[in-house]
Amino acid sequence: MKITKHILLLTFLATGLTACKDDDDDYIPVGEVYSDFVTIAPNSWEYFEDDYGTTGFQTEFEVPYLTEDIQEYGAVLVYLDYGSGAFEALPQVYDDVSVLYNTFAYSLQIQMTGVNGIEIDPPGADVYCKIVMLEATVVEAHPDVELQKMTLSEVERTFGVR
């Protein structure tokens, strides 16, 4: 009789424990946040003309942490400081100059063009560039964050960027 009770108890426990299911659907692995700082010298800007006749100046440089996965699925945020100490988010239009960026695996291109065909000059002094790269899982873990509306300070606080 004791053996029967023990067998029933062990059967009950084994069935109960194996019936439990570990649900990993809500788990989002923590991804990486990378940042890079680049000083763009005045002689780094090159004149360009695109297929539509738009002219301006552009520069391109390597960004080691800008992987294909981050470029394709994550987020890349770019901020420029023209020497005032304040980083401004790109893309932007200021004083009839449009500034935008293009990302490629392991590199970043920044273009400046005059609005409505206005001719512009390249920057005459160093421009400081801060690039923040977020893996897709980091972006998914913050569904209520509107990255395009965030200042550099807000991004640094939210994602722990240094």
Image (tube, rainbow, N blue to C red):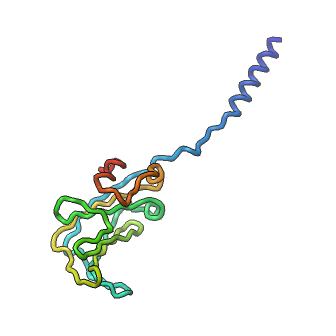
Residue 36: x and y, percent?
A: 30, 58
Q: Is residue 29 left or right of residue 147?
A: right
Q: Is residue 147 above or below residue 122?
A: above
Determine the image quadrant of residue 112.
bottom left
The one nearer the camera, 128 or 66, is: 128
Q: Is residue 136 above or below residue 92?
A: above
Q: Residue at position x 78%, y 20% from top?
A: 7
The one nearer the camera, 57 or 5, is: 57
Residue 85: x and y, percent?
A: 18, 59
Q: Is residue 4 left or right of residue 101?
A: right
Residue 156: x and y, percent?
A: 31, 51
Q: Residue at position x 30%, y 63% from top?
A: 89
Residue 152: x and y, percent?
A: 29, 56
Which of the image's four quarters has the N terminus? top right
What is the number of callouts on the image? Answer: 0
Q: Residue at position x 76%, y 25% from top?
A: 11
Q: Residue at position x 61%, y 41% from top?
A: 23
Determine the image quadrant of residue 84.
bottom left
The one nearer the camera, 81 or 7, is: 81
Considering every residue shown, the one lying at the far top of the view is 2
Q: Is residue 85 left or right of residue 104?
A: left
Determine the image quadrant of residue 80.
bottom left
